[in-house]
Image: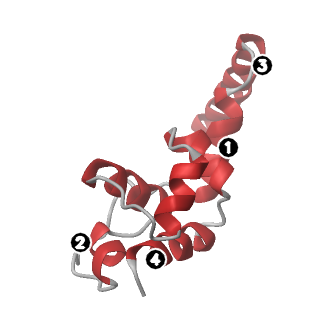
Amino acid sequence: MRLGDRLRQARESARLSQIQVKGYTGINNKTLSNYEKNVSSPDPYTLKTLADLYGVTTDWLISGEQLDFQQSTSYISSEDLRLLGILKNLSIEKKHAIEILLSDTEDSTEKK
């Protein structure tokens, strides 16, 4: 399996479409498609960005082997990223309403 195949497999395992990846990373979906078809390869920074987004290591993307034995503590699930994408596009008023809801939840949790 080649780098592009592993990139596609990791994206699909994270249940992300190429359009969603574009929204989270800014990588053009045609460029992403070229990576996945092994037409071109991402630069190291882009490779790290995709690995973090997909919850895999760059070692695995490059070689297919899990060489990095440290678990990432900064992993964000695809569901969390999806919600962040929704939040990013909300109006200021809706963001404020969500902040109010969250602060109410925090207050009730602290009282217990």
Q: Which mark is residue 6?
A: 4
Reading the chain from its start, which is encountered first: label 2 or label 4? 4
Instruction: Give the labeled residue for mark 2.
Output: 70
Do callouts 1 and 2 mark residues in contact (Cβ within 8 Å)? no
Residue 98, quarter of the rendered image: top right
Dot 3 falls on a residue whose secondary structure is helix
Q: What amino acid type is highlighted by mark number 1?
A: Leu
Instruction: Give the labeled residue for mark 3.
Output: 94
Q: Toward the viewer: 72 or 48?
A: 48
Position of residue 23 measured from the top left corner of the image (x, y, whole percent): 61, 40
Do callouts 4 and 1 mark residues in contact (Cβ within 8 Å)? no
Position of residue 33 measured from the top left corner of the image (x, y, whole percent): 57, 60
Reading the chain from its start, which is encountered first: label 1 or label 2? 2
Q: What amino acid type is highlighted by mark number 2?
A: Gln
Do callouts 3 and 4 mark residues in contact (Cβ within 8 Å)? no
Reading the chain from its start, which is encountered first: label 4 or label 1? 4
Instruction: Give the labeled residue for mark 1.
Output: 83
The quarter in which the N terminus is drawn is bottom left
Reading the chain from its start, which is encountered first: label 3 or label 2? 2
Give me the C-alpha separation between circle 3 and circle 4: 38 Å
